[in-house]
């Protein structure tokens, strides 16, 4: 098949994809906004059973509520890996259709550029898939991780604001408004959405659940669990949140210690992973004839693909070995 025919066919497919996504990404934004802040009657929970119970019965009710919270969190974790959830977590206004459109166009352009340089069809297809499917998602995950790190670094300060406010007699809602106005990003944005939803009648538990959907972190889960237990059982909210703030700061300190202790292993993994491709590029520049068979013969292509797959697997294994999460 001639190259011009392939390029024309790819251009037609890309045009059809663009036309479909443009026609399919219509309105519905106002209705989605209303739905996102609407009150769900199923989220209202009665506390009469706990008020009537005492002693061992209350302990059993608390354990049952904790088990229910754990089950709901497990089901939510499965939903946080979708493309729509990732875009929300990165605080991007782009719809999944637009993101897929950008990925498809980038992949087609990369494939066309590689094919224009007279590369083999399989190599050009691999470059198109890598730049069209892998690169946008890597950038999206990078934005999500960066935003989550900023949120984690300032979330314990937000807990201290609530603790000081509650101890001085301020209601919880006013403390949340203070955080929404004075905290740095992205804590400010998340608490602004929480306060906005609560002001139109959404229960606080539902607001925190939606915050967890936007920021799926253990810290937000802890915050929601503390408030849920305090509302069900009563008690000193300031003391509970002070303990939570202490736990969050200790987790942050432990995370930094792990980062420092694993820095040497990470640097070794980076050097080991980057050395083979860097040496190959330098040898190709200094002695093109020495590496010519690797790029021009079928055996060289096969060996190149096999070595690339082995390198990718090795980098993946090293990443799993040095990537610690708490």
Image (cartoon, helix red, strand yellow):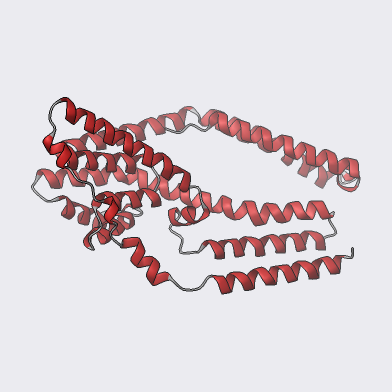
Residue placed most toward the observer, 240 or 20: 20
In the figure, is residue 301 to the left or right of 259?
right
* Total marks placed: 0
User: Seen in the image, is 64 located left or right of residue 282?
Assistant: left
Q: Where is residue 268 in the image (x, y as percent from the top left)?
A: 60, 30
Q: Where is residue 224 in the image (x, y as percent from the top left)?
A: 28, 43
**Quadrant including the N terminus:** bottom right
Query: Is residue 290 at least partly visible in the picture?
Result: no
Q: Classify 126 as above or below 67.
A: below
Residue 277 appears in the rendering: yes
Q: In which quarter of the image is residue 65?
A: top left
Residue at 25% in and 36% down? 244
250 or 141: nearer the eye?
A: 141
* Residue at (12, 38) in percent of width and height: 51
Farthest left residue in view: 169
Give the residue at x 68% y 35%. Answer: 313
Q: Is residue 75 left or right of residue 322?
A: left
Residue 238 image-quadrant placement? top left
x%, y% of residue 143? Answer: 49, 52
- What residue appears at the point 59 percent right and 61 percent down from the top-left corner? 100
Left or right of 91: which side holds 275?
A: right
Residue 126's spot in the image, x, y percent?
75, 51
Quarter in which the C terminus is drawn: top left
């Amino acid at each position: 098949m001639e190259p011009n025919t392939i390029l024309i066919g790819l251009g037609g497919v890309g045009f059809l994809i663009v036309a479909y996504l443009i026609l399919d990404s219509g309105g519905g934004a106002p209705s989605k906004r209303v739905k996102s802040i609407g009150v769900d009657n199923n989220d209202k929970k009665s506390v009469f059973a706990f008020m009537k119970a005492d002693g061992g019965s209350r302990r059993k009710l608390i354990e049952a509520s904790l088990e229910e919270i754990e089950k709901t969190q497990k089901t939510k974790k499965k939903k946080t890996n979708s493309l729509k959830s990732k875009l929300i977590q990165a605080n991007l206004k782009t719809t999944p259709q637009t993101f897929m459109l950008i990925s498809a166009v980038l992949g087609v352009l990369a494939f066309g550029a590689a094919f224009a340089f007279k590369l083999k069809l399989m190599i050009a297809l691999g470059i198109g898939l890598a730049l069209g499917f892998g690169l946008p998602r890597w950038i999206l995950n990078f934005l999500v991780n960066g935003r989550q790190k900023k949120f984690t670094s300032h979330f314990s300060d937000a807990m201290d604001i609530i603790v000081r406010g509650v101890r001085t007699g301020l209601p919880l809602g006013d403390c949340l408004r203070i955080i929404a106005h004075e905290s740095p990003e992205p804590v400010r944005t998340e608490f602004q959405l929480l306060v906005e939803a609560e002001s139109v009648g959404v229960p606080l538990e539902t607001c925190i659940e939606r915050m967890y959907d936007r920021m799926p972190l253990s810290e937000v889960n802890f915050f929601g669990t503390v408030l849920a237990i305090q509302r069900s059982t009563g008690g000193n909210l300031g003391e509970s949140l002070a303990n939570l703030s202490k736990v969050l700061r200790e987790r942050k300190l432990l995370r930094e210690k792990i980062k420092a202790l694993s820095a040497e292993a990470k640097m070794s993994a980076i050097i080991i992973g980057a050395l083979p491709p860097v040496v190959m590029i330098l040898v190709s520049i200094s002695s093109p004839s020495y590496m010519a068979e690797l790029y021009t013969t079928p055996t060289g292509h096969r060996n190149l693909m096999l070595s690339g797959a082995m390198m990718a697997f090795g980098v993946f294994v090293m990443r799993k070995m040095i990537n610690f999460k708490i």
